[in-house]
Amino acid sequence: MKREEAGRQERTGFQESRPYGPKYDLRTDFVMVYGISDDLPERIEGWRKAGYTIHLMTGVSWGEYQDYLYGRFDGREHWDEAQTLRSGDPMLHGKDVPYMAPTISFARYLAEQIRRAIDCGVEAIHLEEPEFWAQSGYEEAFKREWRSYYGEDWQEPHRSPDAQYRASKLKAAMYARTLERICGEMKEYALVAYDRAIRFYVPTHSLINYAQWRIVSPEALLVSMPSCDGYIAQIWTGTARTANVYRGVRRERTFETAYLEYGIMQELTRGTGREMWFLHDPIEDNPRYSWSDYRRNYRATVIASLLHPDVKQYEVCPWPWRVFELDYPTEDGSGKEPIPEAYKTQLLTVMNLLRDMHRHEEAPDPSGAGAGPSGIGLCLANSSMYQRGDVLGEGEDEGEFNYDGTKAADGLTTRQLELLDFSAFYGLALPPVKKGIPLRPVQLDNILTFPGYLEGYRVLLLSYEFMKPEHPGIHQALAQWVREGGVLIYAGDGSDPFHGVREWWNRGAGSRVYERPEQHLFEAMGLGREPEPGEHAVGEGALLHLRCHPAELSRSAAGAERVLGAIRRALELRGEADDYRESGLLRIRRGPYVIAHALDESEAAGGSAVLEGAFVDLFDAELTVRNRVELAPGEDALLYDLGEAAGGWGEEEAAEAGSAHGGPGAGAEEAGSAHGGPGAGEAEAGSAHGGPGAGAAQAGSAHAGPGAAEAARRASVLVSSSRVRDAAREGGRFRYVSESPSEMTVSTRLRACSMPSRIRACAADIPLAGPGADASGGDAVEAEFHAASSTLLLRHEGRPAGVRVELEWL
């Protein structure tokens, strides 16, 4: 049974290896209890009592698997299956925790571990990060797999492009085999033993990140795996801040990289009906940064993900314990400090509004701002991971390196740094994104899998200088797309040594042997094998042939302009020249939410971008109302447009929350900067504040306007840093329950036509009035009415079990 048919809501979730804790109880729909250990039943029970749907997450390439390594599982040691470098050293994730080569024996061991989790009653399993490092492949187990897969003796992967390519292709196939075996076997076990359908998901980094970090993973192979129910896109500051080169400058570009990463990940589900959760992280695996750095980069990744409106589910935080319990370096480096209170509130606001995204489709932006040409794609294939390992001549050895975002790249040689930059991809990808063109990465491997996969694309960019097509049928599909009106921009100079690997284009018979795969593509378009650089008409479409290596395009402003000029010309050839527009802003609307990023390094920016209207600033701990938002290049905005207000939180879902889901809700990630007071263009209004312990905020003036019942009818929750449930009205009262972690301040902005006569709050399990009411008067509430926007800000302490809030008009 599919999850939707069972009525369960799993819009937001998080992963945690620690037992339940109220300070990091984020009130999402589900929790992924991490790791299979002896205390797993107790950890599951703790989270289940808090109302969560329980999933399990465990590593499929590394973990606390010493029982297997040291022979306690089956009587044989398995260190020969640890991924091994050419130096003979194992690739370690920690002490006695190597990355594993996914043998059939290891798959059998993992299946037995997962069986224990199924016995504990989990509803879904997440097998995270199937990762095989490109520089490994020297372990005895891999040598055996090579002989079995290729029918020939193992070759040292670093000795030739062909050996490196074949090694990586085998690594991807091994993990695909392991995942399919585990998922299929365990689904059968759950049905036979418990008559229960279990779901399997694969949390994985993006293809872009794995290729850049030189890691091999199944990625597109998962699309054809029937036992896989979906994915988590593991994109966060740690992946997205990896430096790249644009116009000759190597630096971090967190927003642009994250935007591309989220874009390629959604291609794993397009046309499949499978689920996808986008991940964000309020911090990252590298603990050496300050809270302001984490906050700035977190905002960039959140905005980048929200610019892809087809995905509406989110993992709001990996390891919330480390966010809400641990200290990180101060700005001046003098010590460490816990999470700032304002940032805590901001994070929970974002986490909860992410859960609201399912209600809203992308809406036309009446301003037209940030509207670059759509239908522009950049092809990327699984094989981009197969060309990332070292290839060294006899006697050459400049040392091995691996990069995972937790260490500096300062000690790398020039060649290693250029390899890490992945400039052949970014040379094509960054120029359009930097000019406000919403480029979409296209999974080249999917072209054969899904009919009509390229519908909606007008222009595609392609190069085989950093990847290869794994099937000749891809070219037939591309050629047909061009003949029907598409324009293909091909960039390449034929210099890539991986053109000579043993693959289909050079393994044919007679005249069907090609030196390079693009020769077959050009021939499929009727242009011969070596068309001249320039423009070539193909049916109703065209080929634009750029005779250059795409990495060259990253090294200068002229290179970036060459990419943009090709896109501009491609649209002209389609008769759509007027559609080409550059912008300093990427911006969309999703219902009442306005999502925007002001691009830097771009003359198109033209200074600051200005948004005008009546907005709630969702990156502000106090949910300030602003009439004017100014974004300098590089800044982000996440706003609630009061002119487009939708139904209130906690109302549409009140019925389903009470029936299909009896536990927590909400989830997302952090926000940006706190605001010390109203900014320019903001209207101030009178406020009323309840004193400590008063439990009620009293208005001090008469209440003109609608009657009490009408005032309650108009009231609704617009946005909150808590999960809002059970919103209801009765006479002149409007009430709801607010759930959040403990030891934080909840901010809630409500629609209200006037200041209520009384505002009361108390623990959700205590009645507000009558027998059993809290004699102390309940929780303290701060209230501020904003007359210009007819909104009310409430602030109070958070409780995981909920705070019942009641507004009353007399």
Image: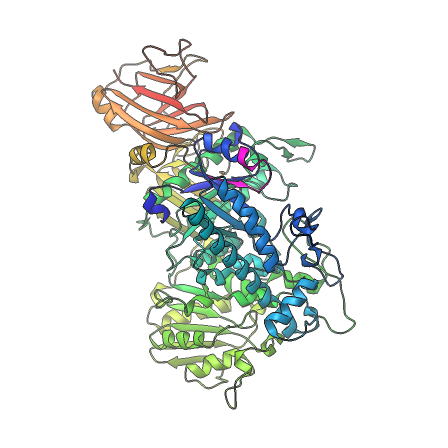
**In which image quadrant can residue 250 be found?**
bottom right
264 drawn magenta: no
- The reply to whether residue 744 is in sight is yes
> In this view of the protein, which residue sits in the foreground, 399 or 178?
178
Seen in the picture, residue 720 relative to 559 is either above or below; the reply is above
Quadrant housing the C terminus: top left
Q: Position of residue 519 (x, y in %)?
A: 50, 82
Look at the image and give the residue range highlighted in magenta.
31-42
Q: Which residue corresponds to the image point at 21% horizontal and 24% vertical from the top-left?
A: 710
**In which image quadrant can residue 30 be found?**
top left
305 horizontally vs 733: left or right: right
Q: Position of residue 740 (x, y in %)?
A: 45, 29
480 horizontally vs 428: left or right: left
Q: Position of residue 683 (x, y in %)?
A: 37, 29
Q: Which residue corresponds to the image point at 31% horizontal and 28% vertical from the top-left?
A: 727
660 horizontally vs 466: left or right: left
All told, the count of numbered labels is 0
Furthest residue to the right?
A: 395
Seen in the picture, residue 157 relative to 774 is either above or below; the reply is below
- The reply to whether residue 608 is in sight is no
Furthest residue to the top?
A: 775
Q: Position of residue 233 (x, y in %)?
A: 49, 51
Furthest residue to the bottom?
A: 510
Seen in the picture, residue 720 relative to 690 is either above or below; the reply is below
34 drawn magenta: yes
> In this view of the protein, which residue sits in the foreground, 604 or 777?
777
Q: How is the image coloured?
A: rainbow
Seen in the picture, residue 524 relative to 219 is either above or below; the reply is below
412 horizontally vs 554: left or right: right
